[in-house]
Amino acid sequence: MKKYLLLTNEELKRTAKPYLIVVAVLMLLEFILTAAITKMHEGKIETFMRENGVSMQEAIDAYGKSSFAQVVASGPFLLILGAGMMVILISAFVIWYRDWFGKTNYIYRLLLLPGSRSSIYFAKLTTIVLLMFGFVAIQWLMFFVLAPLHDLLLPPELFERVSIAAVLERSGLMYLYDFYLPNFALIYLFALLLIVFIFTLVLIERSYRKGKKVIRIFLQFVILGAVYGATLLVINSDHLFANEKGMLFLAFTFLYLAFLVIIGLRTVSKKITV
């Protein structure tokens, strides 16, 4: 346990700076985008009034009021959120490959440490999971900052004040912040599965010669397709209730996740040599 905690702390320290820089850039882009979309809406109203000689109410009837939900549901804003999640997935590759391709070959120092190598695996996994939840939490806080900013930039008659719940629903992000426990478990268990799947691919690529690694990587994708293909066939049965289908999907995901973790631990412990 002590080795795991020390390694996790070390991974977090090595990852913190680039992670915070990326998150800060994405948050700055969200500020700029919120202001730009908000002022563009106001500009359209003013232009319509000037060109057609109509009242503000008539212009509002033509264009509608602006709301923060419209900002979040816009393509560019969702693209920023997608970029943030993509950074997390890329980090799942980087957290391993930087140890091999860095100037110090840090991976060899890790592998030579006394104790079980599983601590290396779980320290890196914990780091990526914390990065993921950190981004989700920061984004949640950003909604409470950007919503008042949106309203502040417009005259009262030009905006519609909406709740954060409405923002999430209209933008399709309610799945990311679904606090109903079964849904929350399913969403983030699947996210964890993606991270562990990436870990498995990296470790296979690092542990086998060219021919074997290609076959084994291809096999992982075949197993992934087979598992979820079979799952979809089962849950599409008319003999199951909706909650039973959800629990079944959750069970299949958990079992496949456990399978990938076992492969990853076995590879770290027995296949990677110094």
Image (cartoon, rainbow, N blue to C red):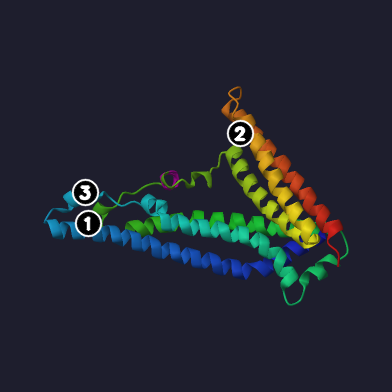
Give the mark nearer the N terminus: 2 vs 3: 3
Q: Which residue is the site of mark 2? A: 246
Task: Name the amino acid, label 2.
Answer: Gly
Q: Is the magenta stretch mostly helix, strand or loop?
A: helix
Find the residue positioned furthest to the bottom: 103
Q: Distance between the residues labelled 2 and 1?
A: 46 Å
Magenta range: 164-169
Q: Distance between the residues labelled 2 and 3?
A: 43 Å
Q: Which residue is the site of mark 1? A: 45
Task: Name the amino acid, label 1.
Answer: Ile
Q: Which residue is the site of mark 3? A: 62
Of helix, strand and loop, which one carries label 2? helix
Q: Is residue 272 visible?
A: yes
In the foreground, 240 or 166: 240
Q: Where is residue 100 in the image (x, y as percent from the top left)?
A: 75, 69
On whether residue 166 falls in the magenta region, the answer is yes
Identified at 78% across, 53% down, the residue is 264
Check disc 1: other Cα within 10 Å, few if <14, some if 14-19, many if 20+.
Answer: many
In-image side of 73 versus 160 (left or right) = right
